[in-house]
Image (tube, helix red, strand yellow):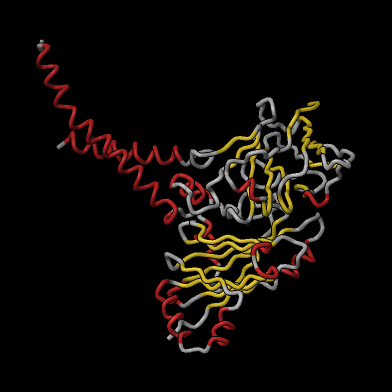
Amino acid sequence: MKTREERIDRLVALVPWGFGLVFGVVAVHLITLLATPSLAPNSAYRRLAESLPLGEVRLLPRATPDNPGPPFSDPFAFLAACRFDLNEGPLRLRAQADGDHPLSVSVRLDNGAIIYSGSDAQTPHGRFNILIVTRAQADAIDESREDLDEAARASAEADELRLVAPSPKGFALFRLLALRQGEAEGIGAQRAGFECKEEKPPS
Amino acid sequence: MRALIIVVFAALGLGLAATAYALRGEPGFDSVRLGPWTTWPHLGGADIDPYERAAIASEGLAPMGVNEGLLFVARADDQGAPLDSRCAYRLAGTDLPARVWTLAAYRIDGRPQPNVADRYGLTSAGLLRSSSGDFVIEAAREARPGNWLPLGDDPNFFLALRLYQAGASTLSKAYEGLSLPTISREACS
Protein backbone atom coordinates (compact mmCIF):
# COMPACT_ATOMS: atom_id res chain seq x y z
CA MET A 1 0.00 0.00 0.00
CA LYS A 2 1.35 3.39 -1.04
CA THR A 3 2.08 5.87 1.64
CA ARG A 4 0.60 9.33 1.56
CA GLU A 5 4.03 10.82 0.75
CA GLU A 6 4.38 8.58 -2.29
CA ARG A 7 1.04 9.69 -3.63
CA ILE A 8 1.94 13.35 -3.11
CA ASP A 9 5.30 12.77 -4.86
CA ARG A 10 3.53 11.25 -7.86
CA LEU A 11 1.10 14.18 -8.07
CA VAL A 12 3.94 16.69 -7.83
CA ALA A 13 5.72 14.87 -10.64
CA LEU A 14 2.64 15.37 -12.84
CA VAL A 15 2.60 19.16 -12.38
CA PRO A 16 5.19 19.94 -15.10
CA TRP A 17 3.29 17.71 -17.52
CA GLY A 18 0.10 19.58 -16.65
CA PHE A 19 1.74 22.91 -17.37
CA GLY A 20 3.16 21.49 -20.59
CA LEU A 21 -0.28 20.32 -21.63
CA VAL A 22 -1.91 23.71 -20.95
CA PHE A 23 0.89 25.50 -22.80
CA GLY A 24 0.55 23.08 -25.72
CA VAL A 25 -3.24 23.49 -25.93
CA VAL A 26 -2.99 27.30 -25.91
CA ALA A 27 -0.20 27.26 -28.50
CA VAL A 28 -2.06 24.92 -30.87
CA HIS A 29 -5.27 26.93 -30.45
CA LEU A 30 -3.59 30.27 -31.20
CA ILE A 31 -1.55 28.96 -34.13
CA THR A 32 -4.56 27.33 -35.80
CA LEU A 33 -6.75 30.37 -35.11
CA LEU A 34 -4.25 32.79 -36.67
CA ALA A 35 -3.65 30.46 -39.61
CA THR A 36 -7.35 29.98 -40.38
CA PRO A 37 -7.86 33.17 -42.46
CA SER A 38 -5.03 32.20 -44.82
CA LEU A 39 -5.73 28.47 -44.92
CA ALA A 40 -9.54 28.17 -44.71
CA PRO A 41 -10.56 26.31 -47.89
CA ASN A 42 -13.92 28.06 -47.93
CA SER A 43 -12.72 31.63 -47.48
CA ALA A 44 -14.09 34.22 -49.87
CA TYR A 45 -10.67 34.76 -51.47
CA ARG A 46 -10.00 31.06 -51.99
CA ARG A 47 -13.39 30.48 -53.55
CA LEU A 48 -12.82 33.38 -55.94
CA ALA A 49 -9.29 32.18 -56.70
CA GLU A 50 -10.66 28.85 -57.93
CA SER A 51 -12.29 30.38 -60.99
CA LEU A 52 -11.63 34.11 -61.22
CA PRO A 53 -8.56 35.15 -63.25
CA LEU A 54 -6.49 38.05 -61.95
CA GLY A 55 -7.68 41.50 -63.04
CA GLU A 56 -11.07 40.35 -64.33
CA VAL A 57 -14.37 41.70 -62.98
CA ARG A 58 -16.82 38.91 -62.23
CA LEU A 59 -20.46 39.62 -61.47
CA LEU A 60 -21.47 37.34 -58.61
CA PRO A 61 -24.84 35.62 -58.52
CA ARG A 62 -27.45 37.56 -56.60
CA ALA A 63 -28.59 36.07 -53.31
CA THR A 64 -31.51 33.71 -53.84
CA PRO A 65 -32.45 30.49 -52.04
CA ASP A 66 -30.56 28.45 -54.67
CA ASN A 67 -27.62 30.69 -55.38
CA PRO A 68 -24.14 29.28 -55.01
CA GLY A 69 -22.66 32.77 -54.48
CA PRO A 70 -21.52 34.47 -51.32
CA PRO A 71 -23.48 33.20 -48.33
CA PHE A 72 -25.53 35.65 -46.35
CA SER A 73 -25.53 38.41 -48.94
CA ASP A 74 -28.26 40.97 -49.34
CA PRO A 75 -30.91 39.99 -51.93
CA PHE A 76 -30.94 43.64 -53.04
CA ALA A 77 -27.16 43.91 -53.42
CA PHE A 78 -25.39 43.22 -56.69
CA LEU A 79 -21.81 42.20 -56.12
CA ALA A 80 -18.90 42.14 -58.50
CA ALA A 81 -15.45 40.91 -57.54
CA CYS A 82 -12.00 41.39 -58.95
CA ARG A 83 -8.95 39.49 -57.73
CA PHE A 84 -5.48 41.00 -57.72
CA ASP A 85 -1.87 40.08 -57.20
CA LEU A 86 0.25 43.19 -56.94
CA ASN A 87 3.36 41.18 -57.78
CA GLU A 88 2.05 41.44 -61.35
CA GLY A 89 1.75 45.23 -61.08
CA PRO A 90 -0.54 47.88 -59.54
CA LEU A 91 -4.27 47.55 -59.95
CA ARG A 92 -6.66 50.33 -60.96
CA LEU A 93 -10.33 50.18 -59.90
CA ARG A 94 -12.92 52.43 -61.46
CA ALA A 95 -16.65 52.70 -60.90
CA GLN A 96 -19.23 55.41 -61.34
CA ALA A 97 -22.41 55.71 -59.28
CA ASP A 98 -25.62 56.89 -60.92
CA GLY A 99 -26.61 59.01 -57.93
CA ASP A 100 -29.72 57.00 -57.15
CA HIS A 101 -28.44 53.56 -56.27
CA PRO A 102 -25.90 53.32 -53.44
CA LEU A 103 -22.56 52.04 -54.69
CA SER A 104 -19.64 51.06 -52.51
CA VAL A 105 -16.23 49.56 -53.06
CA SER A 106 -14.12 47.60 -50.62
CA VAL A 107 -10.60 46.23 -50.95
CA ARG A 108 -9.73 43.08 -49.05
CA LEU A 109 -6.58 41.04 -48.59
CA ASP A 110 -6.43 37.27 -49.06
CA ASN A 111 -6.67 36.85 -45.27
CA GLY A 112 -9.99 38.72 -45.22
CA ALA A 113 -8.68 42.02 -43.81
CA ILE A 114 -10.55 45.00 -45.23
CA ILE A 115 -8.00 47.69 -46.05
CA TYR A 116 -10.48 50.10 -47.62
CA SER A 117 -14.20 50.59 -47.85
CA GLY A 118 -15.97 53.62 -49.20
CA SER A 119 -19.30 54.67 -50.61
CA ASP A 120 -20.21 56.86 -53.56
CA ALA A 121 -21.26 59.59 -51.12
CA GLN A 122 -17.65 59.85 -49.96
CA THR A 123 -16.07 60.16 -53.40
CA PRO A 124 -16.02 63.16 -55.75
CA HIS A 125 -19.09 63.01 -58.02
CA GLY A 126 -19.70 59.40 -56.98
CA ARG A 127 -16.65 58.33 -58.99
CA PHE A 128 -14.20 55.74 -57.70
CA ASN A 129 -10.64 55.86 -59.02
CA ILE A 130 -8.52 53.68 -56.78
CA LEU A 131 -4.95 52.62 -57.39
CA ILE A 132 -3.81 49.66 -55.28
CA VAL A 133 -0.06 49.35 -54.95
CA THR A 134 2.69 47.88 -52.81
CA ARG A 135 4.93 50.23 -50.86
CA ALA A 136 7.74 49.76 -53.42
CA GLN A 137 5.34 50.53 -56.29
CA ALA A 138 4.09 53.65 -54.48
CA ASP A 139 7.66 54.90 -54.10
CA ALA A 140 8.42 54.15 -57.75
CA ILE A 141 5.28 56.01 -58.89
CA ASP A 142 6.17 59.02 -56.74
CA GLU A 143 9.64 59.03 -58.23
CA SER A 144 8.37 58.79 -61.79
CA ARG A 145 5.90 61.63 -61.21
CA GLU A 146 8.57 63.90 -59.79
CA ASP A 147 9.75 64.53 -63.34
CA LEU A 148 6.31 65.69 -64.47
CA ASP A 149 5.35 69.34 -64.39
CA GLU A 150 2.71 70.42 -61.90
CA ALA A 151 -0.21 70.30 -64.35
CA ALA A 152 0.69 66.82 -65.58
CA ARG A 153 1.12 65.58 -62.02
CA ALA A 154 -2.23 67.06 -60.97
CA SER A 155 -3.87 65.41 -63.95
CA ALA A 156 -2.29 62.02 -63.10
CA GLU A 157 -3.44 62.25 -59.51
CA ALA A 158 -6.87 63.77 -60.15
CA ASP A 159 -9.48 62.04 -58.04
CA GLU A 160 -7.06 59.20 -57.48
CA LEU A 161 -7.10 57.37 -54.19
CA ARG A 162 -3.92 55.43 -53.71
CA LEU A 163 -4.02 52.42 -51.42
CA VAL A 164 -0.82 50.82 -50.20
CA ALA A 165 -1.61 47.18 -49.53
CA PRO A 166 0.37 45.48 -46.76
CA SER A 167 0.37 42.21 -48.72
CA PRO A 168 0.14 41.67 -52.48
CA LYS A 169 -2.86 39.36 -52.87
CA GLY A 170 -6.52 40.12 -52.35
CA PHE A 171 -9.73 41.14 -54.04
CA ALA A 172 -11.96 44.14 -54.53
CA LEU A 173 -15.70 44.01 -54.12
CA PHE A 174 -18.13 46.38 -55.84
CA ARG A 175 -21.52 46.50 -54.14
CA LEU A 176 -24.45 48.13 -55.91
CA LEU A 177 -27.84 48.27 -54.28
CA ALA A 178 -31.22 47.94 -55.95
CA LEU A 179 -33.82 50.10 -54.27
CA ARG A 180 -36.83 48.07 -55.24
CA GLN A 181 -37.79 44.58 -56.26
CA GLY A 182 -37.56 44.23 -60.04
CA GLU A 183 -34.76 46.69 -60.67
CA ALA A 184 -32.35 43.95 -61.65
CA GLU A 185 -32.05 44.81 -65.34
CA GLY A 186 -31.31 48.48 -64.86
CA ILE A 187 -28.84 47.70 -62.13
CA GLY A 188 -27.21 45.03 -64.29
CA ALA A 189 -26.48 47.56 -67.02
CA GLN A 190 -24.80 49.88 -64.56
CA ARG A 191 -22.61 47.31 -62.90
CA ALA A 192 -21.18 46.39 -66.29
CA GLY A 193 -19.22 49.66 -66.00
CA PHE A 194 -17.05 48.40 -63.15
CA GLU A 195 -13.42 48.39 -64.15
CA CYS A 196 -10.50 46.52 -62.71
CA LYS A 197 -7.27 46.79 -64.62
CA GLU A 198 -3.71 45.76 -63.99
CA GLU A 199 -1.33 48.64 -64.69
CA LYS A 200 2.20 48.45 -65.94
CA PRO A 201 4.62 48.54 -63.01
CA PRO A 202 6.50 51.86 -62.97
CA SER A 203 9.99 51.43 -64.35
CA MET B 1 8.69 9.11 -23.34
CA ARG B 2 5.17 7.68 -23.25
CA ALA B 3 3.99 10.61 -21.12
CA LEU B 4 5.49 13.08 -23.60
CA ILE B 5 3.66 11.48 -26.53
CA ILE B 6 0.38 11.52 -24.59
CA VAL B 7 0.81 15.22 -23.70
CA VAL B 8 1.68 16.19 -27.31
CA PHE B 9 -1.35 14.40 -28.76
CA ALA B 10 -3.66 15.69 -26.03
CA ALA B 11 -2.44 19.26 -26.66
CA LEU B 12 -3.01 18.87 -30.41
CA GLY B 13 -6.48 17.42 -29.93
CA LEU B 14 -7.61 19.89 -27.31
CA GLY B 15 -6.08 22.87 -29.14
CA LEU B 16 -7.82 21.97 -32.39
CA ALA B 17 -11.07 21.32 -30.54
CA ALA B 18 -10.80 24.74 -28.85
CA THR B 19 -10.34 26.40 -32.27
CA ALA B 20 -13.27 24.51 -33.78
CA TYR B 21 -15.43 25.46 -30.81
CA ALA B 22 -14.42 29.13 -31.04
CA LEU B 23 -15.39 29.23 -34.72
CA ARG B 24 -18.86 27.83 -34.14
CA GLY B 25 -21.85 30.10 -33.92
CA GLU B 26 -21.57 33.86 -34.06
CA PRO B 27 -18.21 35.47 -34.78
CA GLY B 28 -15.99 36.88 -32.06
CA PHE B 29 -16.79 38.12 -28.60
CA ASP B 30 -17.55 41.80 -29.04
CA SER B 31 -21.08 41.77 -30.36
CA VAL B 32 -23.43 44.59 -29.36
CA ARG B 33 -27.08 43.93 -28.60
CA LEU B 34 -29.84 46.46 -29.20
CA GLY B 35 -33.10 44.84 -28.16
CA PRO B 36 -33.52 41.71 -30.31
CA TRP B 37 -30.84 42.90 -32.74
CA THR B 38 -27.16 42.01 -32.62
CA THR B 39 -24.30 43.61 -34.50
CA TRP B 40 -20.55 43.14 -34.66
CA PRO B 41 -19.07 46.65 -34.81
CA HIS B 42 -15.52 45.59 -35.65
CA LEU B 43 -16.32 43.05 -38.35
CA GLY B 44 -15.98 45.50 -41.24
CA GLY B 45 -13.06 47.52 -39.91
CA ALA B 46 -9.33 47.33 -39.48
CA ASP B 47 -9.70 46.55 -35.76
CA ILE B 48 -11.36 43.18 -36.32
CA ASP B 49 -10.18 40.62 -33.76
CA PRO B 50 -8.51 37.31 -34.69
CA TYR B 51 -11.55 35.27 -33.64
CA GLU B 52 -13.87 37.29 -35.90
CA ARG B 53 -11.39 37.15 -38.78
CA ALA B 54 -11.03 33.38 -38.48
CA ALA B 55 -14.79 32.93 -38.23
CA ILE B 56 -15.58 34.90 -41.38
CA ALA B 57 -12.83 33.09 -43.30
CA SER B 58 -14.09 29.67 -42.29
CA GLU B 59 -17.67 30.63 -43.16
CA GLY B 60 -16.64 32.16 -46.49
CA LEU B 61 -18.25 35.48 -45.64
CA ALA B 62 -17.36 38.90 -47.05
CA PRO B 63 -18.87 41.31 -44.51
CA MET B 64 -19.61 44.90 -45.40
CA GLY B 65 -16.84 47.40 -44.77
CA VAL B 66 -17.50 49.95 -42.05
CA ASN B 67 -18.04 52.73 -44.62
CA GLU B 68 -20.42 50.60 -46.68
CA GLY B 69 -22.97 49.88 -44.03
CA LEU B 70 -23.94 48.12 -40.85
CA LEU B 71 -25.54 44.76 -40.34
CA PHE B 72 -27.93 43.82 -37.53
CA VAL B 73 -29.22 40.29 -37.06
CA ALA B 74 -32.26 39.15 -35.06
CA ARG B 75 -32.79 35.50 -34.18
CA ALA B 76 -35.49 36.10 -31.57
CA ASP B 77 -38.37 38.47 -30.94
CA ASP B 78 -38.58 41.20 -28.29
CA GLN B 79 -39.48 38.61 -25.65
CA GLY B 80 -36.46 36.45 -26.48
CA ALA B 81 -38.45 33.66 -28.16
CA PRO B 82 -36.67 32.22 -31.24
CA LEU B 83 -38.16 33.37 -34.55
CA ASP B 84 -40.46 30.75 -36.06
CA SER B 85 -42.08 31.19 -39.46
CA ARG B 86 -45.23 29.40 -38.25
CA CYS B 87 -45.88 32.67 -36.43
CA ALA B 88 -46.43 36.13 -37.86
CA TYR B 89 -44.32 39.05 -36.62
CA ARG B 90 -44.92 42.75 -36.49
CA LEU B 91 -41.88 44.97 -36.88
CA ALA B 92 -42.50 48.56 -35.90
CA GLY B 93 -40.03 51.39 -36.10
CA THR B 94 -39.21 54.84 -37.27
CA ASP B 95 -36.82 56.19 -39.88
CA LEU B 96 -33.33 54.75 -39.53
CA PRO B 97 -30.18 56.86 -39.95
CA ALA B 98 -29.04 55.47 -43.27
CA ARG B 99 -29.29 56.39 -46.94
CA VAL B 100 -31.09 53.11 -47.60
CA TRP B 101 -31.81 50.11 -45.44
CA THR B 102 -32.93 46.61 -46.31
CA LEU B 103 -34.60 43.85 -44.33
CA ALA B 104 -34.44 40.20 -45.36
CA ALA B 105 -35.36 36.80 -43.93
CA TYR B 106 -32.74 34.04 -44.11
CA ARG B 107 -32.59 30.33 -43.58
CA ILE B 108 -30.16 29.19 -40.93
CA ASP B 109 -27.60 28.34 -43.64
CA GLY B 110 -27.45 31.99 -44.72
CA ARG B 111 -29.49 31.74 -47.93
CA PRO B 112 -32.64 33.84 -48.38
CA GLN B 113 -35.71 31.99 -47.22
CA PRO B 114 -37.75 30.63 -50.17
CA ASN B 115 -41.36 31.78 -50.08
CA VAL B 116 -44.51 31.81 -52.18
CA ALA B 117 -43.97 35.38 -53.39
CA ASP B 118 -40.34 34.86 -54.49
CA ARG B 119 -39.51 38.08 -52.67
CA TYR B 120 -36.68 37.84 -50.23
CA GLY B 121 -36.81 41.18 -48.49
CA LEU B 122 -37.78 44.80 -48.68
CA THR B 123 -36.03 48.14 -48.72
CA SER B 124 -36.66 51.50 -47.10
CA ALA B 125 -37.21 52.97 -50.58
CA GLY B 126 -40.32 50.91 -51.20
CA LEU B 127 -41.83 51.20 -47.73
CA LEU B 128 -45.24 52.56 -46.83
CA ARG B 129 -45.01 54.95 -43.86
CA SER B 130 -47.22 57.11 -41.74
CA SER B 131 -46.97 60.89 -42.05
CA SER B 132 -44.58 60.91 -39.06
CA GLY B 133 -42.20 58.51 -40.82
CA ASP B 134 -43.10 55.52 -38.66
CA PHE B 135 -43.54 52.17 -40.36
CA VAL B 136 -44.97 48.76 -39.63
CA ILE B 137 -43.82 45.60 -41.42
CA GLU B 138 -45.74 42.36 -41.21
CA ALA B 139 -43.52 39.30 -41.55
CA ALA B 140 -45.70 36.29 -42.29
CA ARG B 141 -46.10 33.32 -44.63
CA GLU B 142 -49.42 34.58 -45.94
CA ALA B 143 -49.76 37.84 -47.86
CA ARG B 144 -50.56 40.90 -45.76
CA PRO B 145 -51.71 44.37 -46.76
CA GLY B 146 -49.14 47.15 -46.42
CA ASN B 147 -45.49 46.29 -45.90
CA TRP B 148 -45.28 42.51 -46.16
CA LEU B 149 -42.08 40.55 -45.63
CA PRO B 150 -42.86 37.04 -46.93
CA LEU B 151 -41.61 34.14 -44.80
CA GLY B 152 -41.03 30.58 -45.99
CA ASP B 153 -42.17 27.17 -44.81
CA ASP B 154 -38.95 26.31 -43.00
CA PRO B 155 -39.78 27.38 -39.44
CA ASN B 156 -36.21 28.32 -38.54
CA PHE B 157 -35.15 31.68 -39.83
CA PHE B 158 -33.49 34.92 -38.84
CA LEU B 159 -33.78 38.52 -39.92
CA ALA B 160 -31.01 40.74 -41.25
CA LEU B 161 -31.32 44.51 -41.20
CA ARG B 162 -28.67 46.35 -43.21
CA LEU B 163 -28.12 50.08 -42.90
CA TYR B 164 -26.31 51.31 -46.01
CA GLN B 165 -24.21 54.43 -45.69
CA ALA B 166 -25.25 54.74 -42.10
CA GLY B 167 -25.15 58.09 -40.34
CA ALA B 168 -22.23 59.20 -38.19
CA SER B 169 -24.02 58.35 -34.95
CA THR B 170 -24.16 54.68 -35.90
CA LEU B 171 -20.50 54.64 -36.89
CA SER B 172 -19.48 55.63 -33.36
CA LYS B 173 -19.98 51.95 -32.41
CA ALA B 174 -21.83 53.18 -29.34
CA TYR B 175 -25.13 53.37 -31.23
CA GLU B 176 -26.40 56.04 -28.88
CA GLY B 177 -29.94 57.00 -29.73
CA LEU B 178 -30.22 54.39 -32.47
CA SER B 179 -33.71 52.98 -32.36
CA LEU B 180 -34.13 49.74 -34.30
CA PRO B 181 -37.52 48.19 -35.12
CA THR B 182 -39.25 46.21 -32.41
CA ILE B 183 -40.23 42.62 -33.24
CA SER B 184 -43.43 41.38 -31.66
CA ARG B 185 -44.95 37.97 -32.23
CA GLU B 186 -48.53 37.74 -33.41
CA ALA B 187 -50.68 34.69 -34.14
CA CYS B 188 -49.06 31.30 -34.77
CA SER B 189 -50.51 28.54 -36.95
Quarter occupied by the N terminus of chain A? top left
Where A36 sits versus A92, above or below? above
Q: Nearer the viewer, residue B78 or A119?
A: A119
Task: Count the marks.
Answer: 0
Residue at (61, 38) in percent of width and height: B38
User: Closest to the observer: B176 or A98?
Assistant: B176
Q: Quadrant of residue A38?
A: bottom left
- Find residue B19 and report its image quarter: top left
Residue A85 vertical position relative to residue A76 in the rendered view, above or below: below
Q: Position of residue A70 (x, y in %)?
A: 61, 55
Q: Is residue B189 visible?
A: no
Q: Quadrant of the C terminus of chain A?
A: bottom left
In the image, is residue A165 above or below residue A38?
below
Residue B57: x, y in percent?
49, 51
User: Between A11 and B34, which is closer to the camera in this rendering?
Assistant: B34
Residue B51 location, quadrant: top left
Residue sitting at x 39%, y 50%: A34
Q: Is residue B35 visible?
A: yes
| Residue B58 percent coordinates (x, y) | 49, 49
- Residue most extreme to the front: A150
Determine the residue positioned at 14% across, 26% down.
A13
The x and y percentages for residue A113 are 48, 56
Residue A197 vs residue B48: left or right? right
